[in-house]
Image (spheres, rainbow, N blue to C red):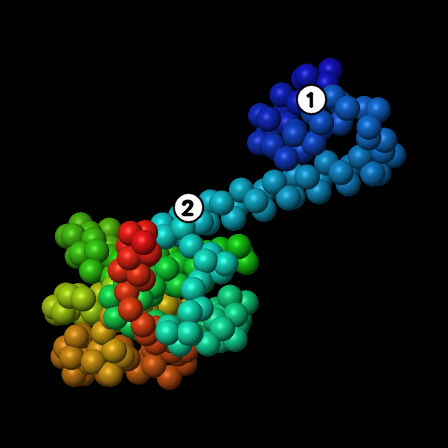
Amino acid sequence: MNNETVKKMGDMRLYGMQTAFKTFVEQPLLISFTNDEMAQYLVENEWDDRKHRTLQRNIKTARFRYSADAEGVDYDNKRELDKNQIDRLFTCDFIKKGNDVFITGSTGTGKSYLASAIGHQACLSGFKVYYANTAKLLSTLKMAKADGSHLRELTRIEKQDLLILDDFGIQAFDASGRALLMDIVEDRHGKHSTIIASQVPVKKWYEVIGEQTVADAILDRLVHQSVRIELKGESLRKTKKSNSII
């Protein structure tokens, strides 16, 4: 009977409940429950298992560039990172408020890592996150535009609680890229948060986007509610390479 019950739990995808029940059956002398306690025990294990699987699925779906977390952030004085500011971002309150975050700095200063770490924490907090290299994302959307499937992708991007656009501005935007970026920003404005990581200073984004009218429209929707972080210091890749030699 117990084997049949375990199988049915698996068939119904009650994996947390299945594991908890098997543990109880295999170790009956170590666990003693009333009927109410047994029900609570099974339901709580199923709840925890589903929550864990949802978190893991969200992290996988986000497609982060780095496996990053809050503990891995380097607060070396040369980087001039405000730990209090970063800690506030890790609470994910900016996502609840729909604010945007700009992370700028020279090549190798850790922009992508920091953006990924914040995104990872957002996943752990139950938010839906999508990470993308800006140029690759726009290229994919351009190709999808040929058969109209880009609309489905734009809808998916719109629904993300947090969108991370990495390597923003490395390539200048053409007319099609500007239009797609405008669609993304317009769809998310006032509803969801976006992190933009770029080695191009914010004041030069107008030049990178091009077309004054479109650039004004895009940045007007991003700049006013943004949190800005500027990373300084030497390239972390260069520093780590030097240390490994030593």
Q: In the image, 43: left or right of 128?
A: right
Look at label 1 and name its amino acid: Thr
10 Å neighbourhood of mark 1: few (<14), some, or many (≥20)?
few
Q: Earlier in the sequence, mark 2 or mark 1?
A: 1
Q: Residue at x 71, y 42 (%)?
A: 44
The Cα–Cα distance between marks 2 and 1, rounded to whole angstroms, is: 31 Å
Helix, strand or loop at mark 1:
helix
Question: x, y (%) of residue 63?
Answer: 36, 50
Which residue corresponds to mark 2? 60
**Residue 204 at x, y percent in the picture:** 20, 80
The residue lying furthest to the left in this view is: 174
Q: Quadrant of residue 4?
A: top right
Placement of 225 over or under 133, stated as above or below: below
Q: What residue lies at 24% left-to-right and 83% top-to-bottom?
A: 203
Question: For the C terminus, which image quadrant?
Answer: bottom left
Residue located 44% across and 49% down the image: 59
Q: Residues within 10 Å of mark 2 (few under 14, many from 20)?
A: few
Q: Residue 49 occupies which quadrant of the picture? A: top right
Which kind of residue does numbered mark 2 sit on?
Lys
Q: Is residue 246 visible?
A: yes
Query: Mark 2 or mark 1, which is nearer to you?
Result: 2
Q: Quadrant of residue 237?
A: bottom left
Q: Position of residue 109 (x, y in %)?
A: 31, 66
Q: Are marks 2 and 1 in contact (CB under 8 Å)?
A: no
Q: Which mark is residue 5?
A: 1
